[in-house]
Image (tube, helix red, strand yellow):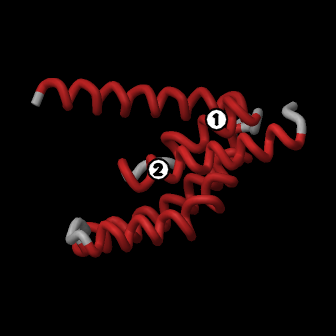
């Protein structure tokens, strides 16, 4: 486990990197903050996911949304249509996650990131 001071400094640095990436790419929680909490701060998968939600949803989500909205880069129709699925899916997914052992959860999460990352990389080079 990491000592208190290093954890505090590491948390601030991780937050800064994640904040920049959130504003720049619109990603952070699952794709960046969760792996950093697990790999650098030694969190178990479930704790990293819960911490990610409290750190990102209220402050970063709102501020990044407002910047994209002011730039005219928000599709309200699609966003509002996606919202009920995200809401209900988050409830279902978080309950499902609690039934998985941390190591299993981490493997499933890593596989998902790998598949989506490979798909994104390949589609960016092919188009």
Q: Position of residue 60 (x, y in %)?
A: 51, 63
Q: Position of residue 14 (x, y in %)?
A: 62, 43
Q: Position of residue 85 (x, y in %)?
A: 40, 64
Q: On the image, which quarter does residue 76 sit in?
A: bottom left
Task: Give the left or right position of residue 31, taking residue 105 as reference.
Answer: left
Q: Is residue 99 visible?
A: no
Neighbour tally class for label 1: few under 14, some 14-19, many 20 plus, Cα within 10 Å? some
Residue plotted at (47% across, 50% down) = 20
Q: Quadrant of the N terminus?
A: top right
Task: Give the left or right position of residue 45, taking residue 6 as reference.
Answer: left
Neighbour tally class for label 2: few under 14, some 14-19, many 20 plus, Cα within 10 Å? some
Q: Nearer the viewer, residue 70 or 93?
A: 70
- First of labels 2, 1 by sequence position: 2
Q: Is residue 34 visible?
A: yes
Q: On the image, which quarter does residue 53 sit in?
A: bottom right
Q: Quadrant of the C terminus?
A: top left
**Residue 105's mark?**
1
Residue plotted at (40% across, 70% down) = 84
Secondary structure of residue under mark 2? helix
Front tag of 2 and 1 = 2
**Distance between mark 2 and mark 1 Cα atoms:** 27 Å
Secondary structure of residue under mark 1? helix
Residue on which disc 2 sits: 20
């Amino acid at each position: 486990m990491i000592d208190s001071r290093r954890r505090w400094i590491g948390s601030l640095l991780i937050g800064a990197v994640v904040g920049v990436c959130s504003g720049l790419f619109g990603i952070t929680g699952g794709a960046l903050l969760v792996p950093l909490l697990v790999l650098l701060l030694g969190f178990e998968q479930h704790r990293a996911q819960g911490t990610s939600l409290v750190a990102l949803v209220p402050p970063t989500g709102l501020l990044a949304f407002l910047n994209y909205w002011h730039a005219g880069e928000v599709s309200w129709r699609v966003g509002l249509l996606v919202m009920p699925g995200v809401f209900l899916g988050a409830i279902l997914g978080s309950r499902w996650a609690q039934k998985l052992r941390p190591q299993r959860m981490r493997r499933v999460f890593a596989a998902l990131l790998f598949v989506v990352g490979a798909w994104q990389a390949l589609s960016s080079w092919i188009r």
